[in-house]
Image (tube, helix red, strand yellow):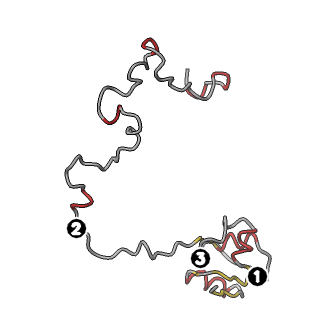
C-alpha cells in the first residue's frame, strides 16, 4: 500500500499517545520520559533552553560584540508591483495605500508601501506611496502618470 492510496475512511490523524495508563500500555510508569534528570520532571521538559551550556559561559557571551547593526532602525516596506496596479486599476485612477488594501493588493496599511517596477504599465495612474524604485518611477512617468511620495 502506498501513502496516496490511503482513503479518508482510514482516517487522517493518529490517535494521541495516552500516557500513564499502566505498564501494559507501553507508556506507563515513566510515561516515555525516561528516568531522572530535568527532562523527566514536570514543568521542565519543555522549558530547557537549547542554548544552555551547563555552567560554561554561553557562546553568545563569549563572542565579542562590536560594530553597528541597523536592525532596530530598518524600515520594512510592503511591496507592490506595477503589473498588479495595471491589472486592478482603470486608466486615470488615483491610487493610494487605502485603495490598494481595498483591491486586495495589501493586507493592511500598517507598513509603508513601496512600488516596484516588475511588469509593464500602459495606464496613466496617479500613485501615492511611501517609496518608489527608480525604475518604477520612470515607468509611471513614461505612461503619463504621477508618482507622489506620501508623508
Circle 3 or circle 2, nearest the eye: 2
Q: How far across and down, in percent of the image, does residue 69 sit?
A: 36, 74
Q: Residue at x 40, y 75 (%)?
A: 70
Disc 3 is placed on an element classified as strand
Q: Who comes first in sequence, dot 3 or dot 2?
A: 2
Q: Residue at x 42, y 13 (%)?
A: 23
Q: How far across and down, in percent of the image, does residue 71 sit?
A: 42, 72
Q: Who comes first in sequence, dot 3 or dot 1?
A: 1
Q: Which residue is mark 1?
A: 94
Local crowd size for mark 3, using a 10 Å CA cut-off: few (<14), some (14–19), many (≥20): many
Disc 2 is placed on an element classified as loop
Q: Residue at x 64, y 81 (%)?
A: 129
Rounded to the nearest angstrom, the CA distance separating label 1 from label 2 is: 52 Å
Q: Is residue 125 above or below residue 35?
A: below
Q: Which residue is mark 2?
A: 64
Local crowd size for mark 2, using a 10 Å CA cut-off: few (<14), some (14–19), many (≥20): few
Do the numbered discs 3 and 2 sit on residues whose CB atoms are within 8 Å?
A: no
Q: Which residue is mark 3?
A: 114
Q: How far across and down, in percent of the image, does residue 47 sit?
A: 39, 44
Amino acid at each position: 500500500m502506498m501513502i496516496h492510496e490511503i482513503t479518508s475512511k482510514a482516517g487522517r490523524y493518529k490517535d494521541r499517545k495516552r500516557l500513564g495508563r499502566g505498564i501494559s500500555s507501553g507508556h506507563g510508569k515513566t510515561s516515555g520520559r525516561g528516568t531522572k534528570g530535568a527532562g523527566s520532571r514536570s514543568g521542565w521538559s519543555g522549558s530547557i533552553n537549547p542554548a544552555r551550556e551547563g555552567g560554561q559561559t554561553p557562546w553568545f557571551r563569549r563572542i565579542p560584540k562590536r560594530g553597528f547593526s541597523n536592525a532596530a532602525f530598518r524600515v520594512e516596506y510592503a511591496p507592490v508591483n506595477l503589473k498588479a496596479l495595471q491589472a486592478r486599476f482603470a486608466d486615470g485612477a488615483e491610487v493610494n495605500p487605502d485603495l490598494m488594501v481595498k483591491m486586495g493588493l495589501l493586507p493592511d496599511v500598517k507598513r509603508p508601501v513601496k512600488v516596484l517596477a516588475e511588469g509593464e504599465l500602459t495606464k496613466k495612474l496617479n500613485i501615492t506611496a511611501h517609496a518608489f524604485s527608480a525604475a518604477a518611477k520612470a515607468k509611471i512617468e513614461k505612461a503619463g502618470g504621477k508618482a507622489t511620495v506620501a508623508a
